[in-house]
Amino acid sequence: MPFMFETILSRVKWTANTLVARLTTLYEYEYPRTAKEETGIDKEYHIKLWDEDIGAMLVSMMRLAGYSEQSQKTHRIFFKEQVARSLGLYPTTYPHQSAWESFMTDDHTPVEMSWSWSGNTPTPVVRYAAEPISWHAGTASDPLNSEATTECLASTAPLAPSLDLRWYRHFLKHLVADDSDGQHDTTDHLSQEFIAFDLDKDSMTVKYYFLPTLKSLACGKTNLELMEESILSLPEADEAVRSSLKVLTTYIRAYPQDEQPQAEIFAVDCVNPANSRLKIYVRSRKTTFDSMLEMMTLGGQTPDLTRDAIDSLRELWCACFALPNNPSVTSKPLRSKEHRTGGLLYYFELRPGAALPTSKVYLPVRHYGKTDDQIARGLSSYLYKRGQCLEGGLSYYEGVRRICKHRSLKQGLGFQTYITCAVKKGVVSVNAYFNPETCQYSRG
């Protein structure tokens, strides 16, 4: 009875806070879009399915990471009341076909989850990203899915005390296409906006992702050119940001045209610009360990990695891809994989006051690993050696086995999507990303 009362009270408080926050946020930031009232869809049915599937996985990940029961309830309520409500139609047939195919994951599931071990922290932070999808996205009434993101973003205010949308508003104008930009004939994806949440004890930090391909096509420019112009027009783009951007763009453009890494995604933290980051994501088709080090240091322009850091990165590389950890492995490319998301993904972070970018690499284990079982065992061993695990000393492998409830880890590849690594002060930080595979595997 006390638990039920507490849950009801939490929902009442959440609803009240959300109503106030939406009105305040929408007024303060003058959102240009309004949501249409749709009929003919049993929305509550689809919301319930999203919550029972991904909401339950989110709680499992939080519990395994050591979050309190109150924290789990707080973030589960937000997911159900705000995020699940923003994911559109839940897939009920397999293979799933939808009018809107999200670029978030390879099977188009519009949510990706992660555990993040920062530096020497023993247990991870839980994070997730979502692409809000309107009920009629991809149809004539909402061809570019322009209606869902605004409401979801506004609803974050009660749990995001540091929310600041100045940079969001700036880049929304520069990087997102709308119907007025004309025809959008492309064989690539139509996704343009993702929202991400880093979960603290009783709050969260919001991040926003822009995929500017449609806007670039409309403007007749490359993604990199569009990102560059939008950053340089930013009022807070100080000399350090400009210098950092110049280092990055010069390095990328120095590649031969057919080998040039391609800019794909741009992201900001929705916090005070003085504390925010500008993140440019680029994909390279080169897949050797040596090429990874080359990209991470921008050809040696950023501070050199220490020998210990390089050894740690090589150990992680071999663990993720089931390769022998010896010197010869560094020059051998991973097996050939012709896929839209093949190759290695990097992000380069620009900050006010920082004259050089910092980097992170995303290892696409879903393409180059053997099975999810092999990947989980490899990363589990790597983390264990560094004193990193889940709550109560539970191994990463056992944690992944528990959250992947719809199939055996040995029976497929793709539940773990990326293993990322970044080096800060000589210490390697690792994140593991998961695709719930909702659009690929039946839960029935």
Image (spheres, rainbow, N blue to C red):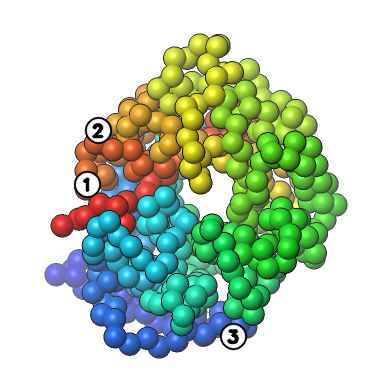
Mark 1–mark 3 CB contact (< 8 Å): no
In the figure, is residue 274 to the left or right of 397? right
Which badge, 2 or 1, comes first in the chain's sequence? 1
Mark 2, secondary structure of its residue: helix
Instruction: Name which residue type carries label 2.
Output: Lys
Residue 351: give x, y in percent of width and height: 72, 50
Residue 121 shows up from this direction: no
Residue 421 shows up from this direction: yes
Instruction: Name which residue type carries label 1.
Output: Lys
Residue 238: give x, y in percent of width and height: 82, 56
Name the residue located 75 percent from the left edge and 28 percent from the top edge.
300
Disc 3 crowd rating (10 Å Cα; few below 14, some 14-19, many 20+) is few
From the viewer's perspective, is the residue at label 2 or at label 3 nearer? 2
Instruction: Name which residue type carries label 3.
Output: Tyr
Residue at the spot of label 3: 27
Quadrant of the frame with the C terminus: bottom left
Name the one closer to the observer, 338 or 114. Answer: 338
From the viewer's perspective, is the residue at label 1 or at label 3 nearer? 1
**How far is disc 1 from disc 3 in space, using C-alphas?**
43 Å
Disc 2 crowd rating (10 Å Cα; few below 14, some 14-19, many 20+) is few
Residue at the spot of label 2: 410
Rendered position, 30 above or below 401 = below
Residue 184: give x, y in percent of width and height: 59, 69
Rendered position, 352 above or below 17 = above
Residue 156: give x, y in percent of width and height: 48, 70
Name the one closer to the observer, 307 or 125. Answer: 307
Mark 1, secondary structure of its residue: loop
Residue at the spot of label 1: 405
Name the residue located 21 percent from the left edge and 55 percent from the top edge.
442
